[in-house]
Amino acid sequence: MPKKGVNWGMLGKMFVGGAVICVGGPAFTYWVTPTEEELFKKYNPDLQKKSLARRAEKQEEFDQFVTKLKEYSKSDKPIWVVQAEAAEEERKLKQLQAFKTREEERLRKEVLRKEMGLSTDSSK
């Protein structure tokens, strides 16, 4: 049985089809996807105002997040471990701060009670 030749037509179609899929697919997606400005224009006016008002705040939050990630990446540990440790430390700090606030409030009430007791005693 003689050896079959190379089917150049089929190989050409395969390469052209692959190129169309590999290049055309992402190009079509890029062409169809709306820009941020187009999406923003489709918002109703109330949402546009809210979005503009919170834009600076969101940008600041993102900058803080990136700054924290940069700090976390300086450690030898994985970022998620360092982030969990930092979250735990922040939680403890908040608890301590809440405790201090409650203690100050308790002392303030105690002082007021003493003052009220003294003022009522002096009026007798």
Image: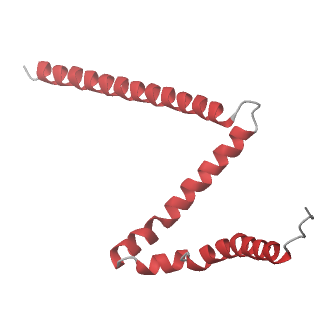
- Quarter location, residue 17: bottom right
Q: How many numbered discs, if any?
A: 0
Position of the C terminus, as image quadrant, is top left
Position above or below: 119 against 25: above
Left or right: residue 42 versus residue 35 is left
The one of 71 and 11 positioned closer to us in this rendering: 11
Q: Quadrant location of residue 5?
A: bottom right
Q: Quadrant of the N terminus?
A: bottom right
Instruction: Where is residue 46? Give x, y as percent.
Output: 33, 74
In the rendered image, residue 27, in percent from the top left (x then y), is placed at 67, 76
Residue 88 higher or lower than 56, as above or below: above
Q: How is the image coloured?
A: secondary structure
Viewer-proximal residue, 111 or 66?
A: 66
Left or right position of 80 against 111: right
In the visual, does 108 lie left or right of 9? left
| View extreme (left): residue | 124
Tell me residue 100's x, y (percent): 42, 25
Q: Quadrant of residue 70?
A: top right
Left or right of residue 6, residue 115 in this image = left
Q: Residue at x 50, y 66 (%)?
A: 55
* Image point (63%, 35%), residue name: 80
Viewer-side residue, 31 vs 119: 31
Query: Percent from the top left, x then y, of residue 119?
Result: 16, 24
Q: Name the residue at 73% across, 40% down.
A: 73
Q: Is residue 65 above or below residue 52?
A: above
**Foreground of the two, 106 or 93:** 93
Q: Residue furthest front?
A: 1
